[in-house]
Image (cartoon, helix red, strand yellow):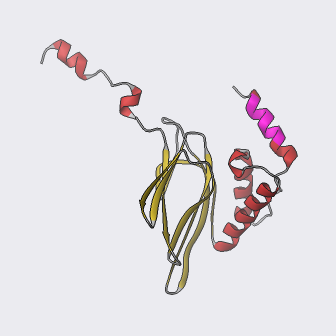
Amino acid sequence: MTNADRMKAHVFPAQSAIDPDPLTRVELTWVQKKIEHWIRFGNPAETTVLDRRRRVVAFAPGCIFAYVRWASNDFGTIISRIDVVRAVRRGEPYQTLPFVRPGGEILLKVDTWPKVESVLRTIDAIETLGIDPAGVAPDYWRHVHNCLAVGETPKAYTAQRHKAWLLRRKTAP
């Protein structure tokens, strides 16, 4: 191997060739009364139907979505969980989650049905204000997570808080 060949061997391909797909993919499964994985909110960039029980939704970097997982067996519920996740850009650090590739920034992670139900009520209250939960300030989802983790009631998200978030986001670099 010549010196020129060695140099060519160390040239990296363009970023798009290394990582042509910047989307975060979430596999959803629905087997009535056994396994139910669904997106509670979020704006998928694309959806692929695998079969009548499974599909994959993909989110663009920066999108926030809520992923709900529930499963049961003959003895009752074995998992109830909701995660509010921000799809990351390539190169950003992320946490892994089952059925989410590559993973995302977890803003809220709750398990047990009473806590999941509390988060679902919080989402409903935000939608009642006419606000898309996917557009809510990421800090708010962390607040909800932290309050539920210590048994406190999270503060309500308000139109005023949302307006402040939109202004902050507009002025951020």
Q: Quadrant of the C terminus?
A: top right
Q: Quadrant of the N terminus?
A: top left
Identity of the residue drawn at 54% across and 47% down: 104
Residue sitting at the far right: 160
Between 38 and 94, the one nearer to me in the picture: 38
Between 27 and 140, the one nearer to me in the picture: 27
User: Number of marks in the image?
Assistant: 0
Give x and y (percent) for residue 73: 49, 82
- The overriding secondary structure of the stretch rendered in magenta is helix
Identity of the residue drawn at 50% across and 69% down: 30
Identity of the residue drawn at 55% across and 41% down: 60
Give x and y (percent) for residue 168: 78, 33
Identity of the residue drawn at 40% across and 28% down: 15
Q: Is residue 7 above or below residue 22?
A: above
Q: Is 20 situated left or right of 32 in this image?
A: left
Q: Is 74 situated left or right of 118 in this image?
A: left
Which image quadrant is residue 115 in?
Answer: bottom right
Q: Is residue 123 magenta?
A: no
Between 130 and 71, the one nearer to me in the picture: 130
Give x and y (percent) for residue 122: 76, 61
Give x and y (percent) for residue 20: 40, 35
Q: Is residue 166 magenta?
A: yes
State the extent of the magenta-drawn residues as a range.
163-170
